[in-house]
Amino acid sequence: MTILETRQECEQCGNSIGELDPSPVCPRCGGLLELVHESLETLRADELRTLFASRRGAMRAPDASGVWRYRELVLPSATPDAIVSHPEGNTPLIARATVCQWAALDGLLMKHEGHNPTGSFKDRGMTVAMTQAKRSYARAVACASTGNTSASLAAYASQAGLPALVFVPAGQVALGKLTQTLAYGARTLLVRGNFDACFALAREASVALNIQLLNSINPFRLEGQKTIVFELLEQLGWDAPDWITLPAGNLGNTSAFGRALRDAKALGLIERVPRIAAVQASGAAPFAQAFAEQFATRRHVEPQTIATAIRIGAPASWDRAVRAIHETNGVVTSVTDDEILDAKAIIDAAGVGCEPASAASVAGAALLRRDGVIGASERVVAVLTGHLLKDPGVLVRYHQETEPPPAHANRPIEIEPNVEEVERVLGERAG
Ligand code: F0G
């Protein structure tokens, strides 16, 4: 198969720079960069499908990675020795009757990205961005984060042997994520401000201090995140679902999904393009508000939600996410914190589990079904972006502390160490 050349191209002004140029944005106009793999269309769909499938049984990275298995569409020039891979990806597509019933969608599947090595989808983008940071001789790497990107960056930087610096909003990062970041060894800065302030600071500091910024404006991250879509399509035998729903915060993933579907359609890997439904938390929903006004203006809000992963008021990848929604005839909606917690309780009790932000994709699917936007028989894949254990604080409050107990609270019961007590508790349950 032909090895493709890759360049970075500015989405605003069309300026091209080399694949190994470490500029975080277009050096000419400051626009966001995207990767262009030359002559992508020369690849044949049937050959690609066979090649991807042949790597599925591999035991070792890079072929064993659910990102690098698709490397012709991700970063074709990366040689196996240059790749920093855990490995990652190969996440399950899960069906659970109770979740389908709750959402009133028989054909609902969940793509569980919490099964990645650091427990979120961020590992898919990070393996590519860290590979690139190493290939371009970065002296250090940095990101602003609501917690998952920082955990992922910390782990991959340590594997790559690169110093890591992360900026997170003080007091607003879920415990699992913060402790991961510390454990993997990143220098962790608790910034007195929200994610948007962290992001502005990380951008400024990375330029001033010549550190590579690996937030999702980094185009290499998006190439890796495309593989969530490739993998779910492959798991469905390349028979595309009607909808893909996902939680939306900084809009990197929405943009990556748009690109993946554009690539898959252009290559003939799929015949029709699923519709993207991006779901925000209603207290942090600038993109959903703008969608309701046909994206007439770029909105900013003061973000507030229990789903701290998507507590973002000024999303960075705005324009490319708008393009993803337009190209897929997609929709953007928002769900309340109560709807998120309800959906999460159902997903958790199905033995699947996810962090609060992830449950927005199922809550959003249920809402769109109730509103008649999604038909009862349509096939929906809801992407669960992070693992249940990322946010133990929300679980403790929901199950043990909130008064009166929420609908699905499962209170623990303290007992004396004797069988009568156990019997009494079982009796209560049965009754
Ligand atoms: N779900 C989870 C679990 C996340 O951590 C994020 C983003 C999203 C969804 C939204 O994705 O930002 O691409 O629209 N987390 C980032 C972080 C912001 O720093 O970990 P997005």
Image: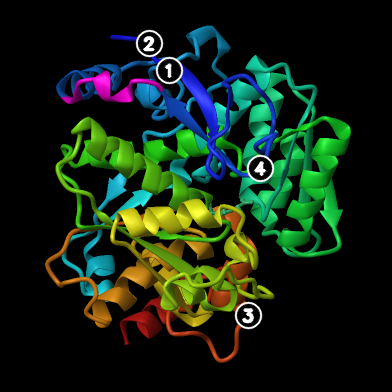
| Residue placed most toward the observer, 348 or 58 | 58
* Above or below for 383 versus 283: above
Q: Position of residue 138 (x, y in %)?
A: 74, 22
Q: Which residue is mark 3?
A: 401
- Report the Cα–Cα distance between label 4 and label 1: 26 Å
* Disc 3 from disc 4: Cα separation: 27 Å
**Label 2, label 3: how far apart the Cα atoms are:** 57 Å
Q: Quick check: which quadrant has ligand 1?
A: bottom right
**Circle 4 or circle 1, nearest the eye:** 1
Quadrant of residue 12 within the rendered picture: top right
Amino acid bearing label 1: Pro
Question: What is the quadrant of the N terminus in the image?
Answer: top left
Q: Judge left or right: residue 345 versus residue 12.
A: left
The residue at label 4 has a CB less than 8 Å from ligand 1: yes
- Of residues 374 and 418, the one nearer the viewer is 374
The residue drawn where x is 49% and y is 69% is 280
Q: Give yes or no for contact between labels 2 and 1 (Cβ–Cβ under 8 Å).
A: yes
Is 41 part of what is drawn in magenta? yes
Which residue occupies the extreme bottom position in the image?
A: 404
- Segment tinted magenta in the rendering: 38-45
User: Which of the marked residues, 2 or 3, is nearer the chain's N terminus?
Assistant: 2
Residue positioned most to the left: 377
- Image location of residue 401, percent across then percent down: 63, 80
In this rendering, the label closer to the viewer, 2 or 4 = 2
Total count of labels = 4
- Residue highlighted by disc 2: 3
- Residue position marked by numbered label 1 in the rendering: 76
- Image quadrant assignment for residue 335: bottom left
- For badge 4, the amino acid type reads Ala
* Mark 2–mark 1 distance (CA, rounded to whole Å): 6 Å
Magenta span contains residue 288: no
What numbered label is drawn on residue 151? Answer: 4
